[in-house]
């Protein structure tokens, strides 16, 4: 049963999307900070949006391997849309609000712990993440097809 799970083409697509998106974050963050940024593998925010990548990969994988007329594809497509909208909208707005609160707290020297932003995404981070989520399942499809899998 476990072998069937890990050999599922949708699972393979999602795994590679997660790995590649976090590898890109790790490389970008490590090069910007000139040290290995291991937290990039589990931290939120940054380039690319892994939430956008993963949900797009889920929807595209289901569309490719189960069909775009399946109920599961429609649910995954809507889920991806909500997640992507949240990454660029709500989370980014909350980040801006938190930054303002932190500035007010700092300027008035109020003794409150600095509030960590939740790392909303810029439109380009979401676009790159979603593009990655579309590209990886397509590559998995063609690779598995060429291997006769």
Image: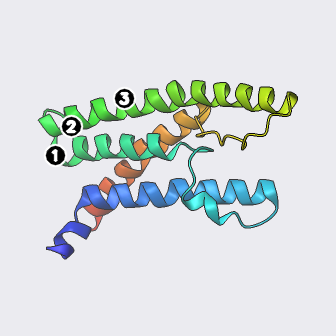
Q: Residue at image x 31%, y 41%?
A: 60
In this rendering, position of residue 12 left or right of residue 68: right
Q: Residue at image x 71%, y 55%?
A: 29
Q: Nearer the viewer, mark 1 or mark 3?
A: 3
Expressed as whole percent of the image width and height from the top left, the position of residue 110 reads: 80, 34
How crowded pointer 2 is (Cα within 10 Å; few <14, some 14-19, many 20+) is rated as many
Expressed as whole percent of the image width and height from the top left, the position of residue 93 reads: 59, 24
Quarter occupied by the N terminus: bottom left
Q: Earlier in the sequence, mark 2 or mark 3?
A: 2
Secondary structure, mark 1, is helix
- Which residue is tagged 3? 81
Q: Earlier in the sequence, mark 2 or mark 1?
A: 1
Q: CA distance from mark 1 to mark 3?
A: 19 Å
Q: Nearer the viewer, residue 49 or 45?
A: 45
Q: Is residue 91 above or below residue 111?
A: above
User: Exactly how many numbered labels are in the figure?
Assistant: 3
Q: CA distance from mark 2 to mark 1?
A: 8 Å
How crowded pointer 3 is (Cα within 10 Å; few <14, some 14-19, many 20+) is rated as some
The answer to whether one can see residue 70 in this image is no
Q: Residue at image x 44%, y 32%?
A: 84
Task: Examine the image and state in which quarter residue 18 appears.
Answer: bottom left
Expressed as whole percent of the image width and height from the top left, the position of residue 124 reads: 61, 32
Q: Residue at image x 23%, y 45%?
A: 62
Task: Examine the image and state in which quarter residue 64 appears.
Answer: top left
Q: Residue furthest front?
A: 111
Q: Which mark is residue 73?
A: 2
Expressed as whole percent of the image width and height from the top left, the position of residue 80 reads: 35, 35
Secondary structure, mark 3, is helix
- Which residue is tagged 1? 66
User: Is label 2 in contact with label 1 (beta carbons under 8 Å)?
Assistant: yes
Q: CA distance from mark 2 to mark 3?
A: 12 Å
């Amino acid at each position: 049963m476990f072998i069937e799970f890990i050999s599922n083409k949708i699972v393979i697509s999602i795994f590679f999307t997660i790995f590649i998106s976090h590898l890109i974050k790790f490389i970008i963050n490590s090069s910007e900070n000139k040290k290995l940024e291991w937290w990039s593998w589990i931290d939120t925010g940054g380039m690319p949006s892994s939430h956008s990548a993963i949900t797009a990969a889920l929807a595209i994988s289901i569309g490719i391997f189960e069909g775009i007329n399946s109920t599961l594809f429609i649910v995954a497509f809507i889920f991806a849309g909500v997640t992507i909208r949240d990454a660029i909208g709500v989370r980014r707005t909350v980040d801006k609000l938190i930054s303002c609160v932190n500035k007010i707290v700092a300027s008035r020297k109020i003794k409150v712990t600095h509030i960590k932003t939740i790392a909303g995404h810029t439109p380009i981070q979401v676009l790159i993440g979603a593009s990655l989520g579309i590209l990886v399942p397509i590559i998995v499809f063609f690779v598995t097809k060429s291997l006769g899998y």
